[in-house]
Image (cartoon, rainbow, N blue to C red):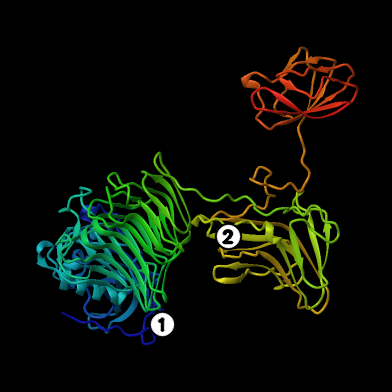
Amino acid sequence: MARFRFISSADALLMFPIVLLLNIAPLAAQQSFTYKAVVQSKESGIVSNQPGIFRASIFEENLNGYPAYAEVQQAWTDDCGVATLKVGAGTALTGKLTQVDWTRQCYLVVEYAPGPEGPFSPIVVNEITAVPVALYAASSASSSSPGCSAFGVCVKDFGAVGDGTTDDTSAFEDALDSAALNGHRVIVPAGIYKITNTLTVPDGVMMVGEGTGSTPLATPVDGSLIRYNGSGAAIELSCHNCGLRDMVIADMTVGENESDGVYLLADNRLSESIRIENLLITNFTGGTAFKMEAKNTGGLYYGSFYDLRIRHAKRGIHIVQDASSSVNSNSFVHGVVSGGGFEYGVLVEGGNNNTFYGTVIEPPQSTAGHFVVNSGEVTGIGIRIEGTSQPTTVPLVSFAAATQNSELSGTYGGGLTIDQGANFINLQSGKALDHKPEADNLLQNASFHGFDGTNLPYWELIGTGVTASILPPELSEEHRVLKLIIPPGVVADLRPSPLFVPKLMGQPEYGTVNFGAFVKTGIPGIAYTRYNSAAGITASTPHPGDNKWHFIGMSMATGATPDPQVEINNTTGVPLEVYITMPTLNFGPSLPSAAPRPIFTSGGILTGTLTHGMVEVSPTGPFIVLPKDGNVFTINGTPTITRINYLLADRFPKGTIIHLIFNSSGANVTSSAYISLKSGFTSTTGSSLTLVSNGDGTWRELNRNV
């Protein structure tokens, strides 16, 4: 068999482009394909109307070694130097055209000689990007390893048997090593493969099976199944841009070896963009089905895990990191954790910004919890958590102390929920739910009312020589602007008066505080918020100094003595003007509201104008019914009133105060068991009577003006 050497373009006598034209004969008859080449000599130019010998060779993967197919044929050039060749119709030198593996990256090399004696010179070396369809089908159909007809390397080409009895470990290891050279896929055709040692997937390699079989839960015989009978993990991914797809991984010992299924590891390295798709991991009842771990300054980032199906395990999904490492920004999309034997459905011990989308966690029961977060931060969106046989003493969902900023939302079967941290569990059922603190602004007088030139009610201004004034609203009609002039070298602090700082609650949901204000200044870096957090005094990102309004704030763990402040450190050497408006503070995972504190809050203090509803009425009898959209009523005419809203459906709540203003003289209000007056009341023009409801249809007089 010939081994061809091709001269370089610098040595070539002939340089030509080539155009590949596919034959349009019926597919069943297509055993060749046509192309045209222009023959041109460096010395004489176009070689027209001349016979020549053409040698065509097809190489798989690279141009080194033997060609998969080679032939020679004679052809004439036309007036333009174009020779029309039919690859497959010449005299074969090596191989068969129908046996070329078109699924590989193939190259076409064409050489030309003016006569049978040569020498041959290359006229084209091109990658074949258009594959003759019938030839592709023929080569695929003749493959000895069904399922290996995709780009990549096939485990059966390395000796894997897939009968469930033969140890295929070495074949898989050799296939993975081969694929690592070029970042190829490792194809795992349908079969049952016994593996006895951990398979380590290299960088850039995706191990791809032919599916998880035709039944969703039984061990498949018509899919790609890896049956593990070893210690440690069945498959380890400590790699970039690698992954697993379309297969089943099962523990052959059903927990006896305490082994793990799939282990994503970043040990003193970065492992980024691992991808898992359509994977069933089952029967790892002695270990973890899917484990992610970063340690020794390692990092696991940007993984994407689609339709990960976990059934029967001790731990379904386990995310863990040490203090020097991070497991960040990984996503679980869909996927199910179900079956029996679970200690944990999902166990999180570190990491942040790891998100579960539409994931279902529904083992009948777990001994330690379905979704347990001991440290770290996670988000669950549209998830479902249910344990039909879960003991009432074992939580379905549990967040440990010091955890914060996690949020779960979706469907909940109901069960014990424990949040010892500052998180939000937005899962509701007829048997269980959690709560989160309101986003309402808890600061008193956030609108800056009542400034007398020196004092601002419910606030303190600290700083030698600092002067303040109140300006009209700019961002909101409800919020005035506080203008501060700060002398050079002075640090000014605006903070709520200590008696009116929102009080901390003992519940863990209040373990996070959010504080900020809108600030405007022309000097960068000098205006920021600060807070006595659990970690000590913490400062926010400062104002950029562009003379525009920006919300400057922070979210942090609450401390024992909060002391929220807007601080300005005038390092400019000249007096400095800074403007502040709309300060706000709230607790929990919700972003704060910049609106003023609502009047209905418990113990709320009114600092602005209170407007009452005012309605005009014209009574026609002694039993009058006042509308509930007001509490100030102007009375037309001269009625005699003996009862007011006394029927059950019409009654005002207890403590409601109404003011009756009479437009005419001569109206009477009778003192009785329904209306208790100091004495009878007869109106004069413009007089008024103030009553308070007892809540039972009766009223008492508070005041009168006659």
- Residue plotted at (36% across, 87% down): 11
Q: Secondary structure at mark 1?
A: loop
> Considering depth in this image, is 302 or 290 the residue closer to the camera?
290
Measured as percent of width and height from the top left, residue 407 is found at: 47, 54
- Residue plotted at (77% across, 38% down): 611
The crowd level at tag 2 (other Cα within 10 Å; few <14, some 14-19, many 20+) is many
Measured as percent of width and height from the top left, residue 237 is found at: 30, 70
Q: Which mark is residue 44?
A: 1
Decide if residue 62 is on the left or right side of residue 467.
left
Q: Amino acid at mark 2?
A: Val
643 versus 150 height, above or below: above
> Considering depth in this image, is 236 or 640 the residue closer to the camera?
640
Measured as percent of width and height from the top left, residue 508 is found at: 49, 57
In which image quadrant can residue 331 be found? bottom left
Decide if residue 1 is on the left or right side of residue 244.
left
- Residue plotted at (24% across, 82% down): 4
Q: Residue furthest top?
A: 621
What is the quadrant of the N terminus in the image?
Answer: bottom left
> Considering depth in this image, is 37 or 588 the residue closer to the camera?
588
**Tag 2 residue:** 513
Measured as percent of width and height from the top left, residue 517 is found at: 69, 60
Give the spatial CA distance, label 2 vs label 1: 85 Å
Q: Residue furthest front?
A: 678
Decide if residue 371 is on the left or right side of residue 248.
right
Number of marks drawn: 2
Q: Amino acid at mark 1?
A: Ser
> Considering depth in this image, is 555 or 706 the residue closer to the camera?
706
Q: Residue furthest bottom?
A: 11
What is the quadrant of the C terminus in the image?
Answer: top right
